[in-house]
Image (cartoon, rainbow, N blue to C red):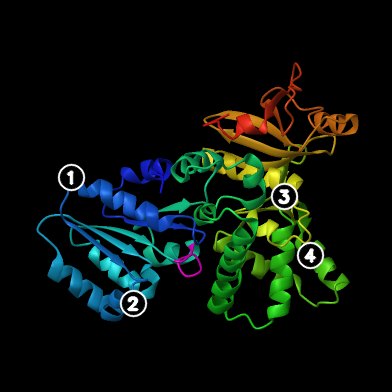
């Protein structure tokens, strides 16, 4: 597996801190691998390292609760600062108490946990200023290219647009095997984890909302529009229930909701938002007859890449009432970004470039498409998708 330095560099400055280091994110995004890579790096200079994987039934059955875990560490620790690595820590009863206690006694604590049980709202409440968290995401394309060298096979941009970046899916070359793996992963992530965690009773409503949301990536809508969709499908669901289920998805890192912003009103547009999937495969496995939603997956991919690059992201409505896909910022630099599959046809060209009308020059203007020809103008820079995917920053 590739070395994921992008994440490790963010964590490295906290190696010796008494803050609890939480490595979180959607299931199967590679959290455990990063934990092991950090541990390997620390072991090169330190010998006081203890690693426990609570998916191992032998460990879980012998250390079922906070008391037994604390006693085990005290019995096996060495003198000086110890570095403790706990994978899938949520399997331990009262694991929060164990972590809070161990950090007080010259231990540097690193933990990962299943996204459905170790959520941001939980550790915010439980650890209250005693932690730092790092969200791990599926592979972006630069990581996929690096991994493809290990696998000794080519992985195309088109493959990424359809099947996304969950690391293990790259072990499977046939479409049938990819679909089987990703479908079972989806069942584990989206259904089993959340249904069990939140004790959801109305499974039909839950699945309808979840499927609608994950198929609607990179689209603008509101809770009321979802309610209208359900009524059209003859399924009853209140707005409060819809919001609650979407919150569950967001807390579990399955989706992100971005609200539009208008310079005209100087405020976020209430009620409306765009959903982006953590991985576009969550859309693709819901597609029938192989008619993959490449247009919206493309925008979703660009969103995920921008998040990876560290940009703050908004959807933007210009004064002409046209939506700009992204207004992004970092280090006091701003960029308007429009995403389209192609602008080769005249109507598409006019539609996409007119979105930049009436925008001031305080931010750079970028259009990203899959086209091979360069459509840059004096005011708008055209980036080919394959070139954008290799950038470290805009």
Under tag 2, what secondary structure? helix
Query: What residue would you read off at disc 4?
Result: 226
Q: Position of residue 341 (x, y in %)?
A: 76, 38
What secondary structure predominates along the stretch shown in magenta? loop
x, y (%) of residue 167?
Answer: 50, 53
* Residue 168 sits above or below residue 373 on the image: below
Label 1 to label 3, Cα distance in Å?
45 Å
Please state the total of marks drawn on the protein image: 4
Mark sitting earlier along the chain (1/3): 1
Secondary structure found at label 4: helix
* Image location (x, y in percent) of residue 55: 37, 71
- Residue 54 locus on image (x, y percent): 34, 71
Give the foreground label among 3 and 2.
2
Which of the two marks, 4 or 1, is nearer to us in this view? Answer: 1
Q: Could you tell whether 341 is left or right of 279 in the image?
A: right
What mark, if any, has residue 218 been given in the picture? Answer: 3
Q: Which residues are magenta?
A: 114-119
Residue highlighted by disc 1: 45
Between discs 1 and 2, the one toward the N terminus? 1
> Mark 2 sits on what residue?
57
**Distance of mark 4 from mark 3, alpha carbons?**
15 Å
């Amino acid at each position: 597996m590739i070395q994921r330095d992008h994440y490790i560099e963010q964590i490295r400055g906290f190696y010796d801190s008494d803050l609890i280091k939480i490595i979180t994110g959607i299931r199967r995004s590679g959290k455990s691998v990063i934990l092991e890579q950090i541990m390997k790096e620390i072991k090169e200079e330190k010998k006081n390292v203890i690693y426990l994987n609570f998916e191992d039934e032998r460990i879980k059955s012998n250390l079922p609760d906070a008391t037994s875990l604390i006693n085990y560490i005290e019995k096996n620790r060495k003198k000086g600062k110890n570095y403790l690595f706990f994978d899938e820590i949520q399997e331990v009863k009262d694991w929060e108490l164990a972590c809070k206690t161990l950090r007080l006694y010259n231990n540097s604590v690193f933990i990962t946990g299943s996204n459905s049980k170790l959520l941001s709202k939980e550790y915010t409440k439980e650890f209250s200023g005693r932690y730092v968290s790092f969200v791990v995401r599926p592979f972006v394309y630069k990581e996929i290219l690096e991994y493809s060298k290990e696998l000794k096979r080519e992985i195309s941009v088109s493959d990424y647009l359809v099947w996304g970046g969950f690391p293990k899916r790259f072990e499977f070359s046939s479409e049938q095997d990819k679909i089987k793996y990703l479908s079972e992963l989806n069942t584990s992530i989206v259904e089993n984890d959340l249904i069990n965690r939140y004790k959801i009773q109305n499974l039909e409503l839950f699945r309808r909302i979840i499927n609608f949301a994950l198929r609607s990536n990179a689209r603008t809508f509101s809770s009321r529009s979802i309610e209208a969709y359900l009524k059209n499908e003859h399924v009853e669901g209140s707005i409060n229930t819809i919001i609650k289920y979407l919150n569950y998805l967001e807390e579990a890192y399955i989706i992100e909701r971005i609200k539009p912003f208008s310079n005209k009103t100087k405020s976020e547009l209430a009620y409306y938002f765009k959903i982006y999937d953590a991985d576009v495969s969550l859309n693709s496995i819901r597609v029938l007859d192989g008619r993959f939603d490449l247009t919206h997956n493309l925008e979703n991919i660009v969103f995920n890449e921008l998040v990876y690059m560290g940009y703050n992201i908004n959807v933007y409505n210009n004064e002409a009432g046209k939506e700009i896909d992204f207004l992004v910022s970092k280090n006091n630099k701003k960029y308007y970004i429009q995403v389209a599959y192609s602008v080769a046809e005249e109507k598409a060209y006019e539609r996409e470039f007119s979105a930049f009308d009436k925008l001031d020059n305080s931010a750079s203007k970028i259009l990203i498409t899959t086209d091979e020809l360069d459509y840059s103008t004096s005011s708008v820079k055209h980036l080919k998708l394959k070139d954008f995917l290799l950038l470290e920053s805009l």
